Amino acid sequence: MCGITGWIDWQRDLSNEYDTLKKMVTPLYNRGPDAEGVWLSPRAAFGHRRLVVVDPEGGAQPMKGKVGNRDYTIVYNGELYNTEDIRKELLDLGYRFRSHSDTEVLLTAFMEWGEGCLVKLNGIFAFAIWDEAQQRLFIARDRLGVKPLFYTQIGSTLLFASELKALLGHPLVQPDITQEGLAELLVMGPSRTPGHGIFRGVKELLPGHFLTYDRNRLQESAYWSLVSQTHEETLDETTEKVRALFQDAVQRQLVADVPVCTLLSGGLDSSAITAIAALSYQEEGRGPLHTFSVDYEGNEKYFKTNEYQPNADGPWIKKVVDHFGTIHHSITVNTDQLVEALKEAVRFRDLPGMADIDASLYLFCKEIKKEATVALSGECADEVFGGYPWFHRSELWSDSKFPWTRNLDFKLGFYSKDVKDAVNAEHYMAQRYREAVAEVPHLAGEEASEEKIREMFYLNLTRWMPTLLDRKDRMSMGVGLEVRVPFCDHRLVEYAWNIPWEMKTSGDREKGLLRRALQGILPHDVLTRKKSPYPKTHNPAYLEATTRWLNEILEDSHAPILPLIDTRALQAFMQQPNLTALHIPWFGQLMNVPQWFAYLAQLNTWMKEYKVRIV
């Protein structure tokens, strides 16, 4: 994994712009701590930070290629899991390779097939290629948006980067947000509308899209989307296909020239990945697999069952570790570390995020990095197979709100009147919801109940899942750890998309089909464990710490968040004697009252450190 950035300009000679490009590439250091590369030409300039995962000697970037008289240059962030399949196809066409890096294979594939190479790729990626002969930029992003890519066009200039901070390294890009950007932060946050870059004029390249830019125009196009069709296979055939696709995805993603591990919570998804990985390691004689889990100081004492977290992870982790003989590492985070890391999490994400859910993941990844460079994680199984409570509880469905944005009124009660008028929260949320539903590729003749559940899957895959992938990428790459997500294999996603709900809930269980596909692989009690999300702290010391931090901000007359907040309402709420007993989930399964205080404190930190201006 890496960090990439670039600059195209039709009026300025970029050959002498090393200093500016350096200011763009330096903020990406954490994404690629192993090497830096810069390439300059009159019309195009690329920067790259490298995390070495495959071919330390042969994968340096920016990388150049040549076919006939045409010169190409690539910067690439990602990993191809079918590198050898594509390499063989290109070898048969007469190409020869200097290295075994996937970067060279990707560049050669583009030189041979152009944009048509995208449909051949199995992996997670964001890359840019400059065609010198055509004076043309091509950038693309993987189908599900695992790897990030932002861009902005200002006059004759186009800038792109893996992260917003790299764009802000260029003098033309300012940390300005409009009312729409404010609505994204205060209404949609910590999620984002796809394509939205928050800062004025900044866009995110959509998943499954590519962009071309030459002297005539900039054009963004889709190369992949979900296609709805009738599912013909029986339950047994479907079960076997899911099992085969999942096993293949995990096994492909174990390939690396550096140590690989898995994240293990003892839940169905992470346990399934660990099982396939451990068995593969045993068959290949690679030695025992390393696994990692995270918990919080005090959780053993303070954990309480709620609607989203039915039980603690510890005993389940031990069952999986004992069954598969992994070498397990348990990471414990204390409250002081967690609160301090909230600020680091903002810097890595470039935005206020999921509070301690982000911060703990950063601390977790920081410890993992001491032992491994690549980790496999169970993200996206719930979106693909329907694991979340809102798939199963119709009272969480709405015609104007996303199911994970409950209690919008709770947030609105703490915004200033000017902000409420500016963002028009209910309208903004409803508009974004309608836009999402309008994109759903419905299947003709589908019953109303199936049509509704298809909408729910689409919302989760395109609106909720990107929030978790964004979190995973920023927090892991913030410490130079590559995290792979086998459940995001596009073949598995495409196949599962059309499986009927009655099959997905086989056995009258959430993710029943996945459980069925994993029979014989996982221990029975792990296989049937009720879903429990990523762990969070239940220690009341965390609420006390975030309350104290937010109070300090409110008492600072120069705090940039003050014009956005109804200070009296917020302080009155914070002084309630029963604060620790309040359960107000306002975003997803884990964001509650302590996370609300932390989100506002992160928002203030972000506005202050990034010198944000509301315009």
Image (cartoon, rainbow, N blue to C red):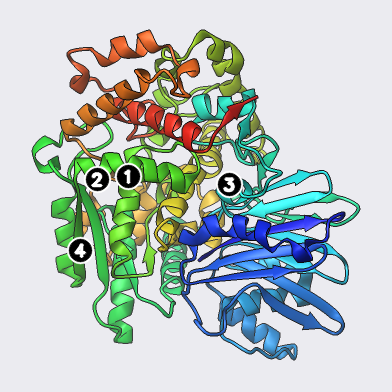
Classify mark 3: residues with Cα within 10 Å, few (<14), some (14-19) or many (20+). many
Q: Nearer the viewer, mark 4 or mark 3?
A: 3
Residue underneath mark 1: 341
Q: Nearer the viewer, mark 1 or mark 4?
A: 1
Is mark 4 in CB contact (under 8 Å) with mark 2?
Answer: no
Q: Position of residue 499 (x, y in %)?
A: 51, 50
Report the amino acid beneath label 4: His
Residue 11 is at least partly visible in this image: yes
Residue underneath mark 2: 337
> Can you tell which quarter of the image residue 321 is in?
bottom left
Q: Which is more N-terminal, label 3 or label 2?
A: 3
Report the amino acid beneath label 1: Ala
Q: Position of residue 140 (x, y in %)?
A: 68, 59
Q: Which is more N-terminal, label 2 or label 4?
A: 4
Q: Nearer the viewer, mark 4 or mark 2?
A: 2
Separation of marks 4 and 2 at Cα, in angstroms: 18 Å
